[in-house]
């Protein structure tokens, strides 16, 4: 069986994008894929399409199995243009009998493609259609991560087409979890959750419960990006449950920017304190790390410690960018602390505390500021602060 075949007469026909490095502000260092799937049954069905500039790959891949004009149905699980960018061209080519989408999908299609006369059929959670031997069941997943998003499930094969959920930006000719480099795939799945889904954690908790309640016999989860899950379903489902419930590891991340290296010295001293307590800690200098990697460490860490020099009564621009990004993604269940150097006004630490307070971080420190250049005694204070945070992490039972 080729690694393009998910089950009998169900094929991967998507596109691999080896070159993409930026996904609206999210760094995609390993590229991505736009997964689309073909079900060859009495009604030949295409599940999702690909980004517009990969239309050629989609058509070429469909032609491996059938003449694309023979497609009867198209399922639109999600209208974002990485999955519907080729929809208009595919509908022209195929002239399908039906195009299935959610109620919110209909609205989103009208707002994207405006005047069209497509044979839309609106489906809701629980709605089923027969393709002949196979049956598709639909599950609306509003706001995961767009209002229109939905899952489609082949009941006979146990294949869940999960749209963006459980995806990873990971370009690869391996298509299944048991073929791929799992630590790399899990890292990209974690990064995907942190950057795309984090703010929807309360809805993801409900979705996981809905799937359990529906008693679906899921054997394969096929997301629209990256590797398809068939041997490690437990791993990705447990990870989603942990992330959605705000569970993290007993470790800390120190994210900082520095003007004349004073805040950097403080960051290292705080890190030393955590190290002395035996708590794993990672230092992220925003000058040389991307915000989408920093937020991935936020997701994984129990404590988030932010440091910035004061500039113009606020914090440094890279920290401003990072905290704006972090606020939008709404991390949950974190211990927080702030530090930084200043020259005369020194507001950065207060502003960082305010933002973490809005996010309901547990602020176990007032925050530590020093003027211009830290003395050895100042750095010792930073190390003590790191030790106290480390101790709090070790004693923490809120997991
Ligand atoms: Fe991969 Fe929300 O599109």
Image: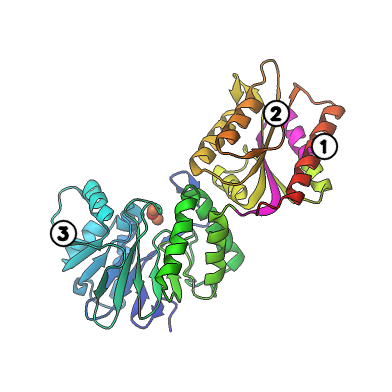
Q: Quadrant of the C terminus?
A: bottom right
Q: Is residue 32 visible?
A: yes
Q: Is residue 19 visible?
A: no
In whole angstroms, how far apart are the C-alphas of marks 2 and 1? 15 Å
- Residue 340 tag number: 2
Does residue 392 sit above or below 210 in this rendering?
above
Ligand 1 is in which quadrant of the figure? bottom left
**Measured from the top left, where is residue 97 in percent x and y?**
16, 69
Q: Circle 1 is placed at which residue position?
A: 384
**Measured from the top left, where is residue 199 in percent x and y?**
48, 47
Residue name at image x 76 percent, y 51 percent: 394
**Measured from the top left, where is residue 284 in percent x and y?**
66, 42
Label 3: which secondary element: loop
Residue 39: quadrant of the picture: bottom left
Residue 257: quadrant of the picture: top right
Tell me, yes or no, whether the highlighted magenta stretch contains residue 250: yes
Upstream in sequence: badge 3 or badge 2: 3
Asked if ligand 1 lies within 8 A of label 1, the reply is: no
Q: Quadrant of the N terminus?
A: bottom left
Upstream in sequence: badge 1 or badge 3: 3
In whole angstroms, how far apart are the C-alphas of marks 1 and 3? 65 Å
Q: Which residues are magenta?
A: 247-270
Tell me, yes or no, whether the highlighted magenta stretch contains residue 335: no
Give the number of the mark in front: 1 or 3. Answer: 1
């Amino acid at each position: 069986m080729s690694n393009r075949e998910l089950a009998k007469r169900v094929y991967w026909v998507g596109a691999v994008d080896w070159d993409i490095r930026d996904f609206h502000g999210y760094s995609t260092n390993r590229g991505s894929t736009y997964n689309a799937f073909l079900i060859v049954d009495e009604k030949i069905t295409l599940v999702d399409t690909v980004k517009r500039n990969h239309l050629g790959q989609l058509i070429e891949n469909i032609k491996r199995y059938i003449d694309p004009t023979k497609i009867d149905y198209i399922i639109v699980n999600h209208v974002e243009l990485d999955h519907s960018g080729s929809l208009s061209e595919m509908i022209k080519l195929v002239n399908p009998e039906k195009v299935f989408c959610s109620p919110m999908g209909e609205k989103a299609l009208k707002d994207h493609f405006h005047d069209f006369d497509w044979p839309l059929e609106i489906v809701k959670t629980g709605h089923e259609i027969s393709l002949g031997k196979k049956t598709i069941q639909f599950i609306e997943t509003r706001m995961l991560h767009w209002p229109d998003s939905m899952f489609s499930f082949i009941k006979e094969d146990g294949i869940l087409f999960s749209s963006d959920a459980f995806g990873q930006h990971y370009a690869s000719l391996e298509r299944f979890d048991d073929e791929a480099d799992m630590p790399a795939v899990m890292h990209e799945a974690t990064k995907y959750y942190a950057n795309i889904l984090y703010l929807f954690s309360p809805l993801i908790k409900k979705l996981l419960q809905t799937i359990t309640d529906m008693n679906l016999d899921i054997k394969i989860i096929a997301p629209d990006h990256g590797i398809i899950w068939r041997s490690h379903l437990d791993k990705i489902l447990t990870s989603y449950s942990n992330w959605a419930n705000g569970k993290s590891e007993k470790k800390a991340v120190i994210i900082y920017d520095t003007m004349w290296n004073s805040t950097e010295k403080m960051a290292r001293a705080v890190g030393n304190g955590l190290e002395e307590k035996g708590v794993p800690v990672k230092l992220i200098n925003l000058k040389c790390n991307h915000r989408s990697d920093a937020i991935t460490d936020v997701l994984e860490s129990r404590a988030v410690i932010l440091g910035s020099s004061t500039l113009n009564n606020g914090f440094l621009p890279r920290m401003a960018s990072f905290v704006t990004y972090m606020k939008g993604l709404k991390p949950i269940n974190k211990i927080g602390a702030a530090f930084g150097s200043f020259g005369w006004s020194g507001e950065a630490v207060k502003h960082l505390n305010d933002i973490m307070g809005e996010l309901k971080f547990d602020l176990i420190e007032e925050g530590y500021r020093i003027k211009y250049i830290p003395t050895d005694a100042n750095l010792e204070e930073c190390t003590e602060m790191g030790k106290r945070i480390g101790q709090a992490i070790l004693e923490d039972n809120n997991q």
